Structures are given as C-alpha cells and as structure tokens.
Image (cartoon, rainbow, N blue to C red):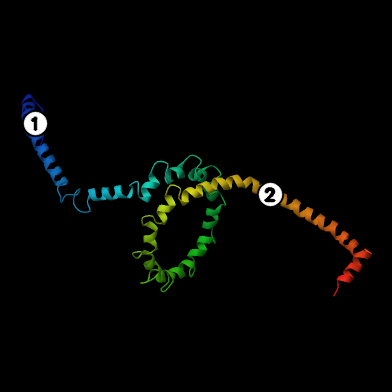
C-alpha cells in the first residue's frame, strides 16, 4: 500500500488514518517471511541449509578437533602470530620477506628473462613434459594411480586427518609443533657456542701440525739410538 503524502491537512489526516493499516500489513508480511525462513523447507533449516553449515563450522572448530586446538587461546595460531614469533620474524625489516622481495633478490631472479620461470614454462620445458599426454600428471591422476591411492578411504589422507592422526599429533599440546618451537630455542642457545667452536678449529689444526713437526724428529732420533736397534732386531722373527 503506497504512503499518502501529507501535502495538506486533509492529506495528513488520511496518512494518520492509513498508518495503522500500513503497519499491520508490514508486520504481517514480516511474519510470513520469518515463517518461510524458519520452516523445515526454508533456507535455514532445510538439509544443507545455513543451520547445517553453521553446525559443520562449529564441529570443525570444537576444542577437541585439530582446527579448534589450532585456533584456541595460546594454541598454534597464537604462537605463530605472537610477538617475536615466526610471522613477526618473517615480516621484520631485513627479514626473509624483505630479502625475497629485494632488488636482485630471489623473486627478481625467478622472474628475470631467461630465469627459472622462463625455463619452466618454455616450449618442451618441464611444464610441457608434465602436462603432455601420458606425462607425469596423467599418470598421477590415472585410475589406480598415486592420487587415487592417496585419497581412497583409509589412505594416507584419511590417516593424516583421522582422530589421533598425524595432524592431531602435530598441533596437540606438547606435540610435534610444540617440540619444534622448543628445539628452536635450544638451537638459538647452541648457535653462539658453535660459532666459538668454528673459530677454534683452525687454531687446533695449526697446533696439530706443529705437534706433528715436533714429534717427527724425535721419532728419527729414537731410531738412531743403538739400544733401540738391538731391541728391534731381537724382536724380529
């Protein structure tokens, strides 16, 4: 129902009279739409609808699931994004990303004319051979091929994401990822000692050479002593 424009006292009166009717119509239409939305066949409750999708997301992010443990407070993602963590070190000035994007850096060399990317996509290059009929990709995706074996029920992919599988062990408290983080701290502590040891090795080598030069003449001198010659002769068969 169109609104009556109150251009005059009479129009204003008509608008006031029509307002309850318009409100009732709008409320009725809203109620009907909500009924459709919430019906078993509506977009929310029907199989595969929004409620199903939300339930799947809730299941995936449950505290006892790998993704849930990854997203939980102080979980893998928090440690990854923590101050001084891997992501911060990656993005810091002079960090790995800076070196990658620097002029004449790895990315420049990769994309340069005649560089690795050119070689990869050249005619009859690696990519051509990979995608050719009967090539590696065909063999990989063939019936009974590696990809099918990887994705079959009970295959490697299933074992990785199964309960208590590789992925769960990787992100679990005290799991592989935690141990790698702890190992990183240990390696950082060992680094300076390895540097000191590397600095000592050349002097040890020089000392060993000097010792060898000093012992050599003593051996020759021992061979010239008469008693040592007789002793050597008496022990001969």
Which residue occupies the foreground of this view, 236 or 173? 236
In the picture shown, does residue 192 fall above or below 146? above
Which residue occupies the foreground of this view, 74 or 123? 74
Residue 231: where, in percent of width, then height? 89, 67
Residue 95 visible from this viewpoint: no
Identify the residue at horizontal 58%, vertical 48% (top origin): 187
Identify the residue at horizontal 38%, vertical 43% (top origin): 72
Residue 145: where, in percent of width, then height? 39, 70
Q: CA distance from mark 1 to mark 2?
A: 90 Å
- Quarter of the image where the C terminus is located: bottom right
Left or right of residue 132: residue 45: left
Q: Are marks 1 and 2 in contact (CB under 8 Å)?
A: no
Identify the residue at horizontal 48%, vertical 64% (top origin): 121
Check disc 2 and report its element: helix, strand or loop.
helix
Q: Which mark is residue 121?
A: none
In the picture shown, does residue 25 fall above or below 130? above
**Residue that label 1 marks:** 19
**Residue that label 2 marks:** 197
| Quarter location, residue 165 | bottom left
Numbered disc in front, either 1 or 2: 2
Residue 105: where, in percent of width, then height? 56, 52
Check disc 1 and report its element: helix, strand or loop.
helix
Residue 236: where, in percent of width, then height? 86, 73
- Quarter of the image where the N terminus is located: top left
| Quarter location, residue 158 | bottom left
| Quarter location, residue 16 | top left
- Near mark 1 (Cα within 10 A), the count class, few <14, some 14-19 or many ≥20, is some
In the picture shown, does residue 209 fall above or below 83? below
């Amino acid at each position: 129902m169109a609104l009556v424009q109150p251009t005059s006292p009479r129009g204003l009166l008509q608008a006031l009279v029509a307002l309850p009717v318009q409100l009732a119509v709008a409320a009725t239409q809203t109620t009907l739409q909500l009924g459709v939305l919430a019906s078993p066949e509506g977009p929310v409750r029907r199989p595969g609808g929004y409620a199903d999708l939300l339930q799947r997301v809730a299941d995936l992010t449950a505290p006892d699931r790998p993704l849930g443990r990854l997203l939980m407070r102080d979980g893998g993602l928090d440690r990854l994004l923590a101050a001084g963590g891997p992501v911060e070190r990656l993005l810091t000035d002079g960090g790995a990303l800076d070196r990658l994007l620097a002029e004449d850096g790895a990315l420049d060399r990769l994309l340069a004319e005649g560089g690795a990317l050119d070689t990869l996509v050249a005619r009859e290059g690696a990519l051509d051979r990979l995608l050719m009929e009967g090539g590696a990709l065909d063999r990989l995706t063939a019936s009974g091929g590696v990809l099918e074996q990887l994705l079959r029920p009970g295959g490697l992919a299933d074992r990785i994401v199964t309960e208590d599988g590789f992925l769960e062990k990787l992100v679990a408290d005290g799991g592989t990822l935690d141990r790698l983080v702890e190992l990183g701290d240990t390696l950082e502590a060992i680094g300076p000692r390895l540097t000191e040891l590397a600095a000592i090795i050349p002097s040890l080598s020089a000392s060993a050479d000097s010792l060898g030069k000093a012992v050599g003449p003593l051996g020759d001198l021992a061979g010239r002593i008469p008693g040592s010659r007789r002793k050597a002769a008496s022990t001969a068969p």
